[in-house]
Image (tube, helix red, strand yellow):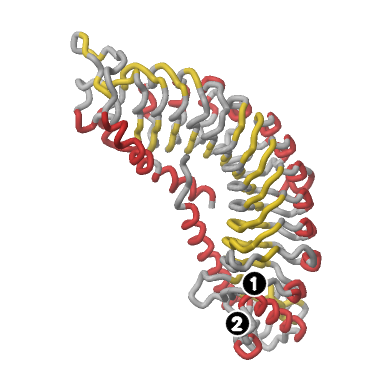
Amino acid sequence: MRQPQSRKLLQLQALSLLLFIIALHSRLHGCSGQGEAADGSASTAAAPMEEKEKRALYAAIEGFVGKGWNGSALYPDPCGWSPIQGVSCDLFNGLWYPTVMSIGPVLDNSLQCSADAKFSPQLFDLKRLKTLSFYSCFPATNPTPIPATSWDKLAGSLETLEFRTNPGLTGPIPASLGRLSSLQSLVLVENNLTGAVPAELGSLVRLRRLVLSGNGLSGQIPASLGNGHFAEQLLIMDVSNNSLTGSLPSSLGGLKGLLKMDLSNNLLQGSLPPELAGLGSLTLLDLRNNSFTGGLPSFLQGMASLQDLLLSNNPLGGSLGQLGWERLRGLATLDLSNLGLVGAIPESMAALTRLRFLALDHNRLTGDVPARLAELPNIGALYLNGNNLTGTLQFSPAFYQRMGRRFASWDNPGLCYSNAAVDAAHAPPGVTVCKVAGGVGDGRKPEASSSLMATSSASNLINGFCFFLWMVATSLL
């Protein structure tokens, strides 16, 4: 199983950059008293802030960072000359209102949650709040559910809701989040949330990003996520690394504008519905590590925008010849390992000129390895190991030297290479020399496998996949 182990680090770096930009915005625009207000009126440094709003802000932050935090003394003018790190403000009708609250150990002077952090009722009194973000705020020693009520108070303002890396954030995703009619981004990543994905989330008609990965969610993907105005706006859908079950609802084919769909590492099953052919804008489809069946669906060859297709570790079955690969010329990453594929590797795969990563390992593929695969101009990793491929590898010494351990062809008992064309220093690991008849490699089954296959295959896989893991993690951010 290949997992993007650098993904978390890259996500944390991206989050740090995001919060730094928010903080900079707070200094230069949100709380500086210069420029124009959110309602279009000219702002002034002397603009006041409602006392009720100020008290709600102090109480909301105190609930998270602890009662020892004296906001009124430390930040008497939170939207003016004494701004709070992670809080931004905007002017509405001549008054300052907090619009952004971001808490968590990202920057040196960021607000950090206490060991007994909690949601304060006053949080929902911040009537102009647009962004609410928490990172590493609730440890496992402080199990805390997301409040089930009061979200409707923020329905007209909240556009971004993000809870990241909170092992103590427990319980279900509240159905009341479906009332946040202005919400554009819902990110609940690496928490400890359980239960079903609420069907009410399908009411978020302005939502563009839905990321619920890394929780303990169960049950089926609700059909409402592919219906109505919700389907028209959504760009990113990531429910990976949960325990979701059942088959995919055909309504997901209604997500016409979707760019990225990641359903990997769940317990999903059944055939891929033909309605997914409607995902014409999709650039990434990640279905790895589920239990999908039914072969490679023909609708895939109509997804001309696809750049990353990741299907590994599913009992799909079928053959590579079912698709016209020349129609998917935009593919950069193609992971089809451990699918139970049979038959030959089609020559048409050599038409994927943008391909950088190709994994066909651990299937039941047979026949020769097309020599034209080595001519792919951008290929950086090629895995053919663990099949029943036969014949003589026709790749050049320069190819083996360039690819190194990012080319794998061991564990194909009938595969060999010619030592007349390739010296031992650049020979493919785990592949034996072809028996010679008249000085020409005859492509017969090798007498024995190289000891490299037994002793080094695990390390070869780990080292070779570093290239792939970096690339997939970058595309998912």
- The picture quadrant where one finds residue 150 is bottom right
Q: Which residue is at a point 71% across and 56% down the rendered structure image?
A: 172
- Under circle 1, the secondary element is strand
Compared across the picture, whether 233 is left or right of 344 comes to: right
Judge by depth and name the residue closer to the eye, 88 or 52: 52
Which residue matches tag 2? 83
The vertical placement of 400 against 369, above or below, is below
Q: Are marks 2 and 1 in contact (CB under 8 Å)?
A: no
Dot 1 crowding, Cα within 10 Å, few <14, some 14–19, many 20+: many
Amino acid type of the residue tagged 2 in the rendering: Pro
Judge by depth and name the residue closer to the eye, 170 or 73: 170
Judge by depth and name the residue closer to the eye, 207 or 66: 66
Which residue matches tag 1? 101
Residue 220, given in percent of the width and then of the height, sits at 71, 42
Tag shown at residue 223: none
The vertical placement of 30 against 148, above or below, is below
Q: Which residue is at a point 72% across and 37% down the rendered structure image?
A: 249
Hey, which residue is sitting farthest top in the picture? 438
Q: Which residue is at a point 26% across and 35% down the rendered structure image?
A: 401
Dot 2 or dot 1: first in sequence order is 2
Q: CA distance from mark 2 to mark 1?
A: 12 Å
Dot 2 crowding, Cα within 10 Å, few <14, some 14–19, many 20+: many
Compared across the picture, whether 440 is left or right of 255 comes to: left
Residue 100, given in percent of the width and then of the height, sits at 65, 71
Residue 50, given in percent of the width and then of the height, sits at 76, 84
Judge by depth and name the residue closer to the eye, 74 or 189: 189
- Under circle 2, the secondary element is loop
- The picture quadrant where one finds residue 223 is top right
Amino acid type of the residue tagged 1 in the rendering: Met
